[in-house]
Amino acid sequence: MIQRRKTRVVKAGGVLIGGDNPISVQTMTKTHTEDIDATVQQIKELEAIGCHIIRVAVPTIVSAKCLGAIKRQIKIPLVADIHFGHHLALEAIAQGVDKIRINPGNMKDRQKLEEFVKAAKDKGIPVRIGVNSGSVRGEGDEHEKLTTLMVKTVLQYCEHFESLGFKDIVLSLKASDVPSTLDAYRLIATQCDYPLHLGVTAAGPPSLATIKSAIGIGGLLSEGIGDTLRVSYTGASELEIKAGYDILEALGFHKRAGVELISCPTCGRCEIDLVNIVEQVRQRLPGDKKNLQIAIMGCVVNGPGEAREVDIGIAGGKGFGFLFKKGEKVRKIPEDRMVDELLEEIAQMSPK
Ligand code: SF4
């Protein structure tokens, strides 16, 4: 069991971030926010697959003025992503968003920044201070390590917000390379108790970003660091949500309802057509959310061990397989009957 870092709790709409609250999974829409129908449609699709918090880009006053109409049609908290224009942040607050994400470094006018902080405080709207590696480069001593500079910058912003009596803060310090991301979050985790939003920024296409995120976000979570996360893909938001859940599941922070299929990679010991069998079983698995673990293993080397530890499993032999249920060897099944008999057995098993 991973011990999570102790953090303050920040409330974004109906979602609590930090403390002992579940690690929330978020993403951004990829529509133009001004297109209210398309944005709402995308958010509803993301809600349906478990997105906890949704962020939308607010590049113009027109998009800011659409936020209220979007919010009224969705269930999950709406976060306005603001760069530069403090008038956009004020409009987003007036529209009733649940959280604002800004990089204070982009609001150079101190008075305007303070006006924004006051408005957020008056409405009880939390703010994510999000600093990316690109935004601090060149800001400090040229010999200063990038991650140290990121942390120093974020802490200065926090101090400024605190001096205005504002502590409803979530922090992010994303870098596009994994080691810097790990360094920055590890360091900030020792310096304050604000909840942390994890991510590896501009991580690339799914094939690459999945690996970067699994190491970057997953690595931090495995150390107890992180309260909410966004996997970022050059790709569909749905995939970002699924990857976020996969990371949480791999670390035991989330348990998906439904069947979990375990199968071996096969090797020269396998004497059944395991790839085909696994694919057929996967396609025909019941969709009734039974919480079952199934193992389909290629041979008797590791097969019986795995098959015994799950609810139901098969360990392959030469043209046949042994069926195991709840740790007991039940019977021998010929290869051509394996898929059907396994699915029949699963259909008769009661959910856990
Ligand atoms: S279970 Fe058997 S077939 Fe599958 S990878 Fe392991 S040794 Fe190879």
Image (cartoon, grey):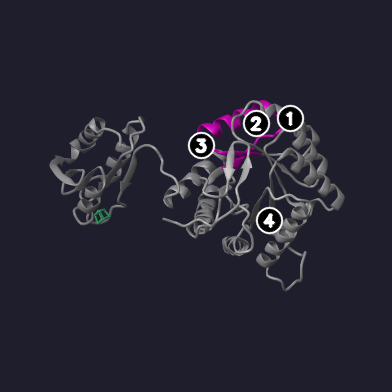
Q: Name the residue under label 4.
A: 132
Q: Mark 1 points at which residue?
A: 66
Residue 104 higher or lower than 343, as above or below: below
Q: Name the residue under label 3.
A: 50
For the magenta stretch, what is the residue range?
Answer: 26-55
Where residue 217 sits: x, y (%)? 53, 54
Quadrant occupied by the C terminus: top left
Q: Are marks 2 and 3 in contact (CB under 8 Å)?
A: no
Where residue 92 sits: x, y (%)? 75, 36
Tag 3: amino acid: Gly
Tag 2: amino acid: Thr
The disc, 2 or 3, on the residue closer to the chain's N-terminal end is: 2
The disc, 4 or 3, on the residue closer to the chain's N-terminal end is: 3
Tag 4: amino acid: Asn
Q: Are marks 1 and 2 in contact (CB under 8 Å)?
A: yes
Residue 296 magenta: no
Where residue 197 sits: x, y (%)? 60, 51
Q: Mark 2 points at which residue?
A: 39
* SS state under label 2: helix
